[in-house]
Image (spheres, rainbow, N blue to C red):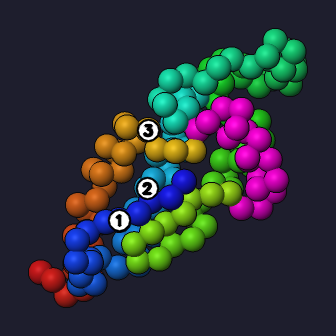
Amino acid sequence: MSLTLRQRGGIPRRVWDLQATRQLALVATGVIQGRAFDQGRGSNAAPMRPYTPAYARARAKAGLRTSPVNLTRTGTLRRNLRPVQVNFTRALIGFTGRARSYAGFVQKDRPFLAASTKDRALIAKALPAIARQAMLRGGVQ
């Protein structure tokens, strides 16, 4: 998932900085993690489709939750979802570590990585505080 800030004429460095983009990316990552891993909802905000009966039995036997689907077995996928590239106007959220090898398969089977409409609203609520902090760092009172 990629976040891109757009402003005509550029964003003045006194009101936005690299740290602000990084903070916004961390907020977006947390919002997506909460929706996908805690609530079991995909990018469209709908519940993820159920596990297959065989997989649900295997999860139950292992003492894992079978409903709602939450994409968590070991926690590796969740722990490795993070901002992987950040610059002044853009942050790329993706996977690191072992999760990189299978995250694409999970995403293809149960799309969860894009921000839903509700996610975008939650991320937008964080923007004023992040911008205020950036302005203070830039010397704007």
Left or right, 35 with reference to 77? left
Residue 38 position in % (x across, y down): 56, 34
Query: Residue beneath label 1, please?
Result: 5
Q: Residue furthest front?
A: 8
How crowded pointer 1 is (Cα within 10 Å; few <14, some 14-19, many 20+) is rated as few
Residue 100 position in % (x across, y down): 76, 56
Q: Quadrant of residue 72?
A: top right
Instruction: From this view, report whether residue 86 is shown above or below residue 111.
Output: below
Residue extent of the magenta highlight: 96-112
Q: Earlier in the sequence, mark 2 or mark 3?
A: 2
Residue 123 position in % (x across, y down): 36, 50
Query: Residue beneath label 3, please?
Result: 116
Compute the Cα span from label 1 to label 2. Answer: 14 Å
Disc 1 is placed on an element classified as loop
Query: Residue beneath label 2, please?
Result: 27
Q: Is residue 91 visible?
A: yes
Instruction: From this view, report whether residue 58 is shown above or below residue 78.
Output: above
Q: Amino acid at mark 2?
A: Val
Disc 2 is placed on an element classified as helix
Compute the Cα span from label 1 to label 3. Answer: 17 Å
Disc 3 is placed on an element classified as loop
Q: Residue furthest left?
A: 141
Q: Is residue 39 visible?
A: no
Instruction: From this view, report whether residue 63 is shown above or below residue 32.
Output: above
* Residue in the picture at 57% in, 44% down: 113
* Residue in the picture at 44% in, 59% down: 3
- Closest to the observer, 24 or 107: 107
